[in-house]
Image (cartoon, rainbow, N blue to C red):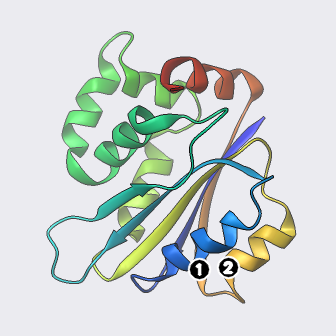
Amino acid sequence: MATVTVWRFDDTDGAERAAAILGQQRGHAYDAATVTWETGAGRPATHQVTTGAGSLGNGFWGLLFGLVFFVPLLGAALGTAPGAEAGSLAEAGIDDTFVNRIRDQLTPGTSALFVVTAEPPPDALHDALTGGGRAEVVSTDLSAEQAAALREVFAD
């Protein structure tokens, strides 16, 4: 099983602070990225935080962030194409509901930390990243088969 968790912060520095905390907990995450959307910016900035064994790499993050922020209509069109990578995301448990929740919550003046873990994040990590309720959490659990499918399509 794997879990994709998004911690959304009400400021543009929250994701970077959370990424630093995550860096101290390396045993738990095998891939992560941040999104920062400055007030007044036309689109958010993204940054892959971790790489290495099990990393889903730039292809995964690029497609996910493209679906969420940059070209939602293209993402919908790709999802209907047989064998398309976007379809692979939906089959892997990252469906329209998850993408739409993220799209609705990340707006100018906010930031988010996206983390893919081999299992649900431990409570201690969750507590450290939410910082006493300063973050909203969106997550989706992936079966072992779904996680393997993502790695097969996207692993570097």
Upstream in sequence: badge 1 or badge 2: 2
Q: Residue at x 49, y 30 (%)?
A: 90
Pointer 1 local density, CA inside 10 Å: few below 14, some 14–19, many at least 20? many
Q: In 3D space, how far apart are the residues under numbered discs 1 and 2 (Cα atoms)?
A: 5 Å
Relative placement, left or right, of 36 versus 139 is left
Residue 45 on image: x %, y %: 29, 63
| Label disc, if present, on residue 10 of the rendered structure | none
List the residue tagged with mark 2. Answer: 130
Q: Residue at x 57, y 50 (%)?
A: 50
- Front residue of this view, candidates 80 and 44: 44
List the residue tagged with mark 1. Answer: 135
Question: As displayed, is residue 45 above or below residue 150?
Answer: below
Quadrant, the N terminus: top right
**Corner quadrant of residue 147:** top right
Secondary-structure class at tag 2: helix
Question: As displayed, is residue 125 above or below residue 147?
Answer: below
The answer to whether the residues at label 1 and label 2 have Cβ atoms under 8 Å apart is yes
- Front residue of this view, candidates 96 and 58: 58
Relative placement, left or right, of 53 versus 95 is right
Residue 110 on image: x %, y %: 38, 79
- Front residue of this view, candidates 94 and 58: 58
Residue 26 on image: x %, y %: 74, 56
Query: Which amino acid does the dot numbered 1 rest on?
Result: Ala
Secondary-structure class at tag 1: strand
Q: Residue at x 30, y 15 (%)?
A: 81
Relative placement, left or right, of 47 versus 142 is left
**Corner quadrant of residue 102:** bottom left
> In the current view of this chain or complex, which residue is farthest to the right?
123
Query: Which amino acid does the dot numbered 2 rest on?
Result: Thr
Residue 85 on image: x %, y %: 39, 22
